[in-house]
Image (cartoon, rainbow, N blue to C red):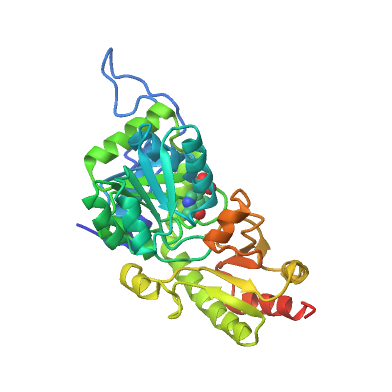
Amino acid sequence: MAFRQATIAVRSGLNNDEQYGCVVSPITLSTTYNFYDLNIPRLYDYSRRRNPTRDVVQKTLADLECGVGAIITSSGMSAIHLLCTVFLTPGDLVIAPHDCYGGSYRLLSSLSERKFCRVQFVNQTDKNALTTALSAHPKLIFIETPSNPLLRVADILDICSIAHEAKSICVVDNTIMSPVLQQPLLLGADLVVHSCTKYLNGHSDVVAGAIVAKDVDLVEKILWWGNTLGVTGGAFDSYQLLRGIRTLFPRINQQQSNAQSILTFLQNKKNNLQIRNIFYPGLTTNLGYSIACKQQKGFGAMLSFELNGDKVMLRQFLSSLKLFTLAESFGGVESLISHPATMTHACISEEARNYAGISDMLLRLSVGIEDSEDLIDDLDRAFREINY
Ligand SMILES: *Cc1c(COP(=O)(O)O)cnc(C)c1O
């Protein structure tokens, strides 16, 4: 019987314990497993290669993304690095978004400096730029949509179809949407990568990553290389991650609904000229709005805006907030605010930041599951404490 996503998130791997009938799948910490007999190993032999707790999360995530298998890795970055190792040889070209996650930008540019591969950062919402880039027959095209922190939306179906004509492998970083709001494998992607540190775990207490693949051949490759490189996720992290995934649906629903209320509040501030721009895929004025409607099941719980003012005002605003914590990362139950120019995107040169449109007045919100009225009161107080 095939279940719907929300049921899979809650029930995948339940009741799988033969010994005690545990309802919750037990954690297996053993690193090594005895052999039945000489030359007769069990399913599990050594936990770097395969671990029962990690297996349960891998299956859960593969099912949520409609893939055939997955690997859980030690972090989102190790998942992306693993992809590079599996698919690239020196000379191969990678196309990545010009406004991709700062860590991905750093990894890809550093690997290309070492001649591990070649990389080209392209504005993937610009069809001409993308077509030109694809005419160089990249081995891998890396898509991240909506992008971070400006929430630009790229058309996954469209990009995958032209990329496949150029014989490229399509990978989508689905961290910002989670499989609740977007399922890239159903839109033509070959692989999906996640930072499970964000929405999937959702409680800001695990660093982990994942790759989900659409066919068996790709799954075997990522599992083989994952073990060879030793980047597989630990048992504790896998256990915590599965616990987080149990509430993925209600969390995302509440976070989205809170984001919607905050958006309305911010639009008022924009009308009062306290804000210059708001970036959110659900705004009809957003360039990617129609694509978002087509490929997403919701607009998500991240939004960015530019404060109308200077650095002094920005500092006043941030220091007045009591609920929105100034911190990197996103996707947890608690609301966070970040300043991309000095935080997540500080490792990108000012020139590249400007090209990507990340101004010094840009702030990014990750909306949590607190009471939305408290969140709005908090922002409202901070606006009132700015000396205009
Ligand atoms: C956080 C993040 C990553 C990196 O994941 P880590 O778990 O921090 O290593 C990659 N891509 C996106 C979009 C992210 O937000």
Is residue 289 rendered to the left or right of residue 199?
A: left
Q: Is residue 168 left or right of residue 180?
A: left
Q: Residue at x 33, y 31 (%)?
A: 224
- In the image, residue 344 above or below residue 158: above
Picture mark count = 0
**Residue at image point 67% right, 81% down:** 274
Which image quadrant: the C terminus? bottom right
Q: Quadrant of the N terminus?
A: bottom left
Q: Is residue 12 visible?
A: no
Task: Measuring from the top left, give residue 345's x and y in whole percent.
Answer: 59, 54
| Extreme residue in the right direction | 387
Name the residue furthest top.
38
Residue 288 in percent (x, y) is at 40, 71
Query: Is residue 247 visible in this depiction of the protein?
Result: yes
Q: Nearer the viewer, residue 136 or 235?
A: 136
Residue nearer the viewer, 71 or 240: 71
131 relative to 270 in the view: left or right: left
Q: Nearer the viewer, residue 162 or 193?
A: 162
208 vs 149: above or below: above
For residue 330, side relative to residue 166 (left or right): right
User: Which quadrant holds residue 154?
Assistant: bottom left
Q: Residue at x 62, y 64 (%)?
A: 359
Residue 382 x, y percent position in the rendering? 72, 75
Residue most extreme to the left: 1
Residue 337 lies in quadrant: bottom right
Residue 251 placed where, x, y %? 47, 65
